[in-house]
Amino acid sequence: MFSLSEENYIKAIFHLQKHPQSGVSTNALAEEMQTKASSVTDMIKKLSEKKLVIYKKYQGVYLSETGRETALKIIRKHRLWEVFLVEKLDFSWDEVHEVAEELEHIKSEKLILELDKFLNYPKRDPHGDPIPDAKGNFQVANKILLSDLSIGEKGTLVGVKDSSSEFLKYLDKNNIALGKSIEILDKEDFDGSMLLKIEDQTLRVSTMVTINIYIKV
Amino acid sequence: MFSLSEENYIKAIFHLQKHPQSGVSTNALAEEMQTKASSVTDMIKKLSEKKLVIYKKYQGVYLSETGRETALKIIRKHRLWEVFLVEKLDFSWDEVHEVAEELEHIKSEKLILELDKFLNYPKRDPHGDPIPDAKGNFQVANKILLSDLSIGEKGTLVGVKDSSSEFLKYLDKNNIALGKSIEILDKEDFDGSMLLKIEDQTLRVSTMVTINIYIKV
DNA sequence: TTAAATTTTTAGTTTTAACTAAAATAAATA
DNA sequence: TATTTATTTTAGTTAAAACTAAAAATTTAA
Ligand SMILES: [Mn+2]
Ligand SMILES: [Mn+2]
Ligand SMILES: [Mn+2]
Ligand SMILES: [Mn+2]
């Protein structure tokens, strides 16, 4: 149906869009895809001809309905594979993303239906992100960034914004994991760093950390 | 490491070679790869420069030691994925090959080691073919083609030569499966067709069938 | 509201892996 | 052995997806 490259662009546009109908700039896409703006323009034109994106010169792109459906299918596959790797193959959450980047392109309806069944229809991936069902539906959790909490507020860690291996390893090392309860004991105004109570331990973390952790209050 | 196309050529050469050091002809490879002879020549030159094959103009190609190791790794992955699909995801043996053709190219050492462990180190795939271990070792069963048996001889079905969906569905329909005992009740000299006793049932089959079934006597 | 800076697009190249058509070599046969 | 046929290679194109350099459009700032 679509090439590897096309699929990766669709996914990137989806992730950068965030708000429907809001245009993603050529430069932002180039940055995300680790490529040059001119290459992006070429690909955008192709995707536009295939009706996957809406594109007007110099105005940026956004996904068409077909494009959005395509993106959600790929994301569904990516996240299901991540669950599989962690739950069944003893991968840790910092090791799965790269492999899932490849697995998400395997083309087989049955494969993904059966995998979903095998995993018992998981709702979230190892990083707390929602997994769309076969129809593309998923519930967005009302999570907020840890950095937006004030002293005294409490919540549960439900997701990470940065899924890089480095960040996840840092979290592992400090015993920070999905599902743990977090309370803000102190917050520095000048640099946003926080003193946290995570279950039984207390820990001081930088903004780099607080802006990459999602909390459900 | 190697491109999708390179990997597929390596695998094709491995399958066509059968005897070490025996050259595979350009046309045979073109047939197997569903492409043109001139394209094959191009790719062979590239593989030769990469030291994966031994090639002399007009003399055909065969795998170098590195080439053979590469081929065995891909075949190992292919067959492990086939086992996974059948054992864990309820695929039938006629549905797995195509998907495995894609999955075999996923690049992750850990993935395949863990998959092997998860499947409990299977020795054969759903079609009876041996699965090389992490070092590339595998035992070749002393199987023979059903067509080589004579009236009165018995054996067990241990493999299929043709893994096409059509052939496997034919076998399913007639209750022919790996592990079943087979006895040759009669054999026609003029066309090679056979009257078989498979467990409790008797069945007449054509040469098309007998030359694609492996028996262990 | 011009001019400068930034962003985006166009034009032209490169690489990979295909292709067709034609030339070269090898194998088969008269 | 000479000729015909088949196989294989070479030469030249094409398409996808990247690139660089330069032109065009938009945005920001003087
Ligand atoms: Mn991921
Ligand atoms: Mn994830
Ligand atoms: Mn197979
Ligand atoms: Mn198989």
Image: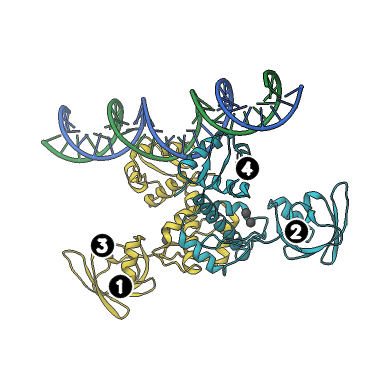
Chain colours: A cyan, B yellow, C green, D blue
Q: Nearer the viewer, mark 4 or mark 2?
A: 4
As displayed, is residue B67 above or below residue A204?
above
Locate residue B183, reporting x and y percent: 29, 75
Q: Using residue A22 as the reference point, say whether residue A182 is left or right of it.
A: right
Give the residue at mark 2. Answer: A172
Residue type, mark 2 in image = Asp
Q: Secondary structure at mark 3?
A: helix
Residue at image location 71% in from the left, 59% down from the top: A143
Locate residue B52, reporting x and y percent: 47, 42
Give the residue at mark 4. Answer: A32
Query: Are both tags, 4 and 2, on one chain?
Result: yes
Badges 1 and 4: C-beta atoms under 8 Å apart? no
Q: Is residue B40 visible?
A: no
User: To which chain does the residue with label 3 belong?
Assistant: B
Q: Secondary structure at mark 4?
A: helix
State the CA–CA distance, disc 3 to disc 2. 59 Å
Give the residue at mark 3. Answer: B208
As displayed, is residue A67 above or below residue B202?
above
In this view, the residue farthest toward the bottom is: B200
State the CA–CA distance, disc 2 to disc 1. 55 Å
Give the residue at mark 1. Answer: B174
State the CA–CA distance, disc 1 to disc 3. 15 Å
Q: Pick whichever of labels 4 and 2 is earlier in the sequence.
A: 4
Q: Quadrant of the N terminus of chain B?
A: top right
